[in-house]
């Protein structure tokens, strides 16, 4: 058996199984936002059940009725109402009492008027989706009101039960408020948890980088080559996940509701710098392997990466010294201007930066106040589904600027119209299938449209719903036959646990939520005496009917072409890149004002990082709308989309690299550099307008003017200046962005004028 060559005698740091599980949980759920929501549900729902049981018993109502009505408002408010302020959370929870009770009473009163009852469902569902743009209070009322209306619709009760049921709802909301006050968020602890999850994802990148360096032999056997390709793919996935959690953490800091101060700015800077250092180390490791670096060079890098994995980022300086010393005795070090030398030096610098960031994280942890608004972080404020916003802003652009702009449509109003029309179609069809449970078709419409924006997302969510229903139905039927109705306490515990697990999966894997919900419904139907084995197949059929009609309606009514959405996503990223290009020479692209007591260097530093983050966010949005429903191996539109994504992702990487290396824009840059940035920004603006107009537009073809000559002139003009290296770095970044986007311009039939020239001092790393 061949012996594996290695110089790495220091084993990576061994974490216990508990530490690994904790790190994984924190990496999957930054700040434990979803976990906290699941725990709130786990406590609030049984508390609401208990209150409902007590009040129902006191008024002579069936106990099962009190338990069900008591659980509903507790569960809905825990799922929907998320606010960084404990006081606002309590107020919003209490305020939904009125819409829930009014809707419940109205539904009970309308039971003799079937047609009116069905029409009102259409109206309420329209209001629920339209209210998303009316503010959180209106959205809370619309969602909870619809839930209350469904409760009254499903429970044939006399009007005399409205008062005791209203008391059940009030009691349930009261105990929910108490639970949420007891389990109020701790911003300081949440910040520490988030940092730990962020670090865990960074460790994944470094471990993947170590695996790439260890398996990076060029010209090896076929099995070794396959291992190398697998290691590179693993590194790419690790970097993508790390990129997502960096955006998530940065977004949580920005959305905390706390006014930005020096501490908040420092946290943003640390997130960016840590992300940049680790991502650059992973990218550099992949570059060493892909370019065929000798084994002694790879082993020197592997040793340095392993030191950080074993001892943490605080040993980054030691890793840098180790890397430089070991590389210095290799034959590759003799070529001072080689790409390998440049990569190794860059890795050493990033190891040192990683140490500085780690030390500052520790200092900041000790400086942060333990309580109050002084902690610039609040985990209850999540992003779109707990992740960076994907297609939401892109679809909003498409609606506002598309063919329906004269109708003054918004994204939420468009979805509300889809919901109303789809439900109006589904209701009679669902009545034909199963008149007693037609509302399953209505729910199928609602779940597919809620939280989705593109056809891909809606079909994917419908499929998740179907898979979850099948799995949950199989488990639920087995549990009903095993438990029956003779073990009510076991059933209550099972229901509460499943609702908590489903709440955790609601913002991530929707099929988990659907499966848990179906198991719960099986138990509810068993205790209500209406359970049959054919119940779940019928529910699946009606849910999928509603989902299919919702997708078809959204494709026909106020349609937005997928190509148009993609073009607007591309335009959003080009606009973000343009703003970064201007910021690179100290020019602001908007009228934002900075605090008077902030130094010019600090403003420039923040601006570069913020502009780079905006480019990263736009890249994430582009990925969200580029996911095809079916991936054709021969390419087709997906091939062109992949090329577009490659160019734009390269521009985002170059922007992040420049922001991380420069820290701030060069002071008093040469006129040639400013001219190149202005010319590049103008070319990007023309390309963005041309792309969003579409290939068949009458708009004149965009002209892309290459700026290589101006960049060469700028580098020459900076010779001998104290900031020569900064000018070279800025020119290098502009040149690489120009190179990447010129290819994109050429693919979009723009006229490309001039040629790229890489002058002396611009080192491609």
Image (cartoon, rainbow, N blue to C red):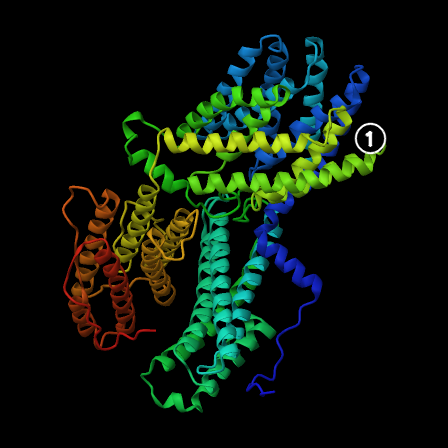
Residue 426 lies left or right of residue 341; in this view the side is: right
Task: State which quarter of the image contains the N terminus.
Answer: bottom right
Q: Position of residue 526 (x, y in %)?
A: 76, 29
* Quadrant assignment, res 441: top right
Residue 375 lies left or right of residue 182; in this view the side is: left
* Quadrant assignment, res 754: bottom left
Instruction: Choose between 241 and 352: the one closer to the eye.
Output: 241
Q: Tell me if residue 321 can be seen.
A: no
Q: Tell me if residue 146 can be seen.
A: yes
> On screen, 338 above or below 237?
below
Q: Position of residue 627 (x, y in %)?
A: 42, 49
Q: Dot 1: what SS?
A: loop
Query: What residue is rendered at 54% in x and 16% in y?
Result: 118
- Residue identifier under label 1: 485
> On screen, 309 above or below 642?
below
Query: What residue is rendered at 29% in x and 65% in y?
Result: 733
């Amino acid at each position: 058996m061949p012996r594996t060559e290695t110089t790495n005698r220091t084993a990576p740091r061994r974490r216990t199984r508990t530490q690994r599980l904790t790190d994984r949980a924190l990496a999957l759920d930054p700040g434990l936002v979803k976990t906290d929501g699941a725990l709130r549900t786990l406590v609030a729902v049984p508390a609401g059940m208990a209150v409902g049981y007590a009040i129902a018993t006191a008024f002579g109502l069936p106990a099962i009725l009190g338990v069900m009505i008591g659980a509903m408002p507790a569960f809905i408010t825990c799922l929907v109402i998320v606010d960084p302020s404990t006081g606002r959370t309590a107020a919003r929870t209490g305020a939904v009492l009125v819409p829930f009770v009014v809707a419940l009473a109205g539904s009970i009163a309308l039971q003799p008027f079937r047609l009116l009852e069905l029409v009102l469902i259409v109206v309420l569902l329209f209001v629920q989706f339209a209210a998303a743009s009316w503010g959180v209070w209106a959205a809370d009322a619309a969602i909870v009101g619809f839930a209350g209306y469904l409760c009254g619709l499903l429970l044939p009760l006399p009007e005399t039960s409205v008062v005791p049921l209203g008391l059940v709802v009030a009691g349930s909301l009261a105990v929910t408020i108490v639970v949420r006050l007891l389990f109020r968020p701790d911003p300081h602890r949440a910040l520490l948890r988030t940092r730990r999850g962020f670090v865990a994802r960074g460790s994944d990148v470094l471990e993947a980088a170590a695996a790439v360096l260890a398996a990076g032999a060029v010209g090896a056997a076929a099995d070794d080559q396959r291992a190398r390709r697998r290691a590179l793919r693993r590194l790419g996935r690790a970097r993508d996940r790390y990129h997502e959690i960096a955006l998530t953490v940065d977004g949580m800091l920005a959305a905390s509701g706390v006014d930005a101060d020096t501490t908040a700015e420092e946290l943003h800077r640390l997130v960016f710098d840590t992300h940049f250092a680790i991502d650059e180390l992973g990218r550099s490791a992949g570059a060493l392997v892909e370019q065929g670096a000798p084994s002694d060079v790879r082993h020197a890098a592997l040793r340095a990466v392993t030191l950080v994995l074993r001892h943490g980022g605080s040993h980054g300086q030691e890793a840098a010294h180790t890397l430089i010393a070991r590389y210095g005795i290799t034959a590759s070090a003799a070529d001072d201007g080689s790409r390998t030398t440049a990569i190794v030096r860059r890795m050493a610098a990033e190891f040192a930066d990683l140490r500085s960031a780690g030390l500052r994280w520790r200092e900041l942890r000790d400086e942060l106040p333990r309580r109050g608004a002084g902690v610039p972080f609040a985990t209850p404020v999540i992003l779109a589904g707990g992740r960076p916003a994907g297609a939401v802003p892109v679809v909003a652009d498409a609606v506002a600027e598309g063919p329906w702009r004269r109708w003054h449509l918004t994204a939420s109003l468009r979805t509300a119209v889809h919901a109303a029309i789809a439900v109006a179609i589904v209701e009679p069809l669902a009545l034909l299938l199963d008149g007693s449970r037609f509302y399953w078709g209505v729910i199928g419409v609602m779940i597919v449209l809620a939280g989705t924006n593109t056809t891909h997302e809606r079909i994917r969510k419908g499929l998740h719903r179907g898979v979850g229903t099948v799995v949950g139905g199989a488990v639920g039927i087995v549990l009903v036959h095993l438990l029956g109705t003779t073990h009510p306490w076991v059933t209550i515990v099972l229901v509460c646990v499943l609702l908590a697990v489903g709440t955790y999966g609601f913002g991530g894997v929707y099929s988990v939520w659907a499966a848990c919900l179906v198991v719960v419904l099986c138990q509810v139907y068993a205790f209500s005496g209406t359970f049959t084995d054919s119940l779940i197949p019928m529910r699946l059929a009606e849910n999928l009917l509603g989902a299919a009609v919702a997708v078809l309606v959204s494709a026909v009514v106020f349609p937005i072409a997928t190509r148009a959405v993609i073009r607007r996503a591309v335009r959003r990223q080009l606009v973000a890149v343009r703003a970064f290009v201007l910021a690179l020479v100290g020019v602001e692209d908007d009228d934002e004002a900075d605090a008077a007591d902030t130094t010019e260097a600090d403003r420039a530093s923040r601006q570069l990082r913020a502009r780079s983050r905006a480019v990263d966010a736009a890249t994430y949005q582009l990925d969200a709308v580029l996911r095809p429903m079916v991936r054709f191996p021969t390419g087709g539109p997906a091939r062109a989309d992949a090329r577009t994504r490659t160019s734009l992702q390269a521009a985002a990487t170059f922007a992040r690299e420049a922001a991380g290396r420069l820290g701030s824009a060069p002071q008093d840059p040469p006129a040639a550099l400013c001219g190149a940035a202005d010319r590049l920004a103008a070319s990007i603006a023309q390309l963005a307008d041309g792309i969003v107009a579409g290939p068949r537009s009458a708009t004149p073809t965009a002209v892309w003017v290459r700026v290589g000559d101006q960049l060469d002139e700028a580098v020459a003009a900076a010779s001998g200046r104290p900031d020569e290296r900064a000018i070279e770095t800025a020119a290098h970044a502009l040149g690489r962005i120009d190179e990447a986007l010129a290819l994109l311009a050429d693919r979009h039939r723009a006229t490309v004028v001039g040629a790229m020239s890489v002058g002396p001092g611009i080192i491609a790393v």
